[in-house]
Image (spheres, rainbow, N blue to C red):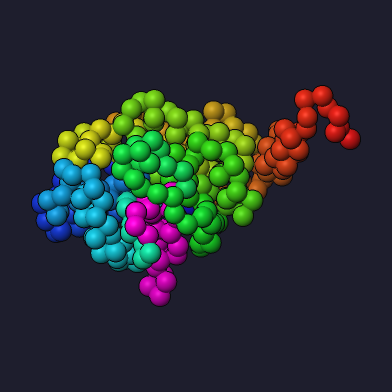
């Protein structure tokens, strides 16, 4: 299959029609290029706050974006069906019933008209800004999503920097990990990218990073955006020596695409020069041994 991952510039649309037109144009471009799976970035849904004139206020922007989240997801569902593609929607705030604070959620959609909403994933670990300033909270636990393309897991931005989260999805059967991101410094971008590449290495899987790019001074929540979209695999059998399947230019908007052979994931896990995926349990056992080695078998 072909994967398209977005380096997505944030705009302040002045109408729902303008917002919808942008989404349609992005999906149409990737679909016409032959993409089967489209990956949008974290917090790109904050564009919706501009529609309600609430983007300049951190708290108000959460509620404004959340109020249009369902409408935006249904727009994407229509596009997934119309173009016959799978789409990881832009993530954004959602206030679930019973929650006083929002979670950061992204829906994965498919082309089936009867069941376009495959499942959602909430962010697990909050950054300092999310927890100390914005008061966005962790949501529902990690879960692999079964699709016609394969078994997909989602690690939203910061989550990709934690090996145990990626491993939890792989142990549930994930073959592809999607990493929608939103980072405001080069340091932050590289932390997520390095995390994504490390998850590909240690789990011998494909990891896809999308990102927001450019300035959005109309919103203090997402005012600066630095990143490059990329698609990564393990640096081993059937994959590039550096593990990079496709890599965008820093801060350059647009789609980054790569053709993925799903069979290559099974082959590298079974025939690779190393067996990181299979040897993970062994590493966990060794890490738990006391320093004096008294529990060695």
Front residue of 155 and 63: 63
Magenta highlight on residue 120: yes
Give the magenta-colored segment's residue range.
99-123
Q: State the residue at coordinates (47%, 57%).
A: 140
Q: State the residue at coordinates (36%, 26%).
A: 186
Picture quarter with the C terminus: top right
| Residue 274 position by quadrant | top right
Front residue of 26 and 130: 130
Residue 196, image x, y percentages: 50, 37
Q: State the residue at coordinates (40%, 44%).
A: 180
In this picture, residue 60 sits left or right of residue 201: left
Residue 40 visible from this viewpoint: no
Q: State the residue at coordinates (64%, 51%).
A: 171
Residue with the most extreme right position:
297
Magenta highlight on residue 280: no
Residue with the most extreme bottom position:
114
| Residue 129 position by quadrant | top left
Q: Is residue 70 above or below residue 221?
A: below
Q: Is residue 143 above or below residue 205?
A: below
Residue 291 visible from this viewpoint: yes
Front residue of 149 and 42: 42
Residue 182, image x, y percentages: 34, 39
């Amino acid at each position: 299959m072909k994967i398209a991952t977005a380096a997505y510039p944030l705009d302040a649309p002045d109408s729902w029609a303008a917002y919808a037109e942008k989404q349609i144009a992005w999906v149409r471009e990737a679909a016409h290029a032959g993409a089967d799976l489209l990956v949008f970035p974290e917090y790109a849904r904050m564009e919706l706050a501009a529609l309600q004139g609430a983007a300049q206020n951190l708290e108000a922007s959460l509620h404004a974006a959340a109020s249009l989240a369902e409408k935006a997801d249904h727009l994407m569902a229509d596009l997934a069906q119309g173009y016959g593609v799978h789409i990881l929607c832009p993530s954004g705030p959602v206030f679930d019933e019973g929650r006083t604070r929002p979670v950061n959620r992204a829906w994965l959609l498919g082309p089936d008209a009867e069941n376009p909403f495959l499942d959602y994933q909430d962010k697990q670990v909050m950054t300092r800004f999310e927890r100390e300033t914005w008061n966005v909270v962790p949501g529902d636990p990690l879960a692999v999503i079964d699709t016609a393309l394969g078994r997909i897991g989602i690690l939203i931005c910061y989550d990709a920097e934690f090996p145990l989260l990626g491993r939890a999805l792989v142990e549930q059967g994930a073959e592809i990990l999607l990493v929608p991101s939103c980072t405001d410094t080069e340091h932050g971008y590289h932390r997520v990218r390095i995390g994504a590449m490390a998850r590909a290495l240690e789990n011998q899987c494909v990891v896809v990073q999308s990102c927001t790019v450019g300035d959005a001074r109309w919103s203090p929540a997402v005012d600066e955006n630095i990143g490059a979209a990329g698609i990564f695999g393990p640096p081993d059998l059937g994959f590039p020596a550096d593990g990079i399947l496709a890599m965008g230019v820093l801060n350059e908007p647009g789609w980054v695409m790569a053709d993925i052979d799903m069979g290559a994931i099974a082959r590298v896990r079974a025939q690779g020069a190393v067996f990181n995926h299979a040897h993970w349990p062994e590493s966990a056992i060794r890490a738990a041994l006391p320093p004096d080695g008294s529990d060695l078998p």
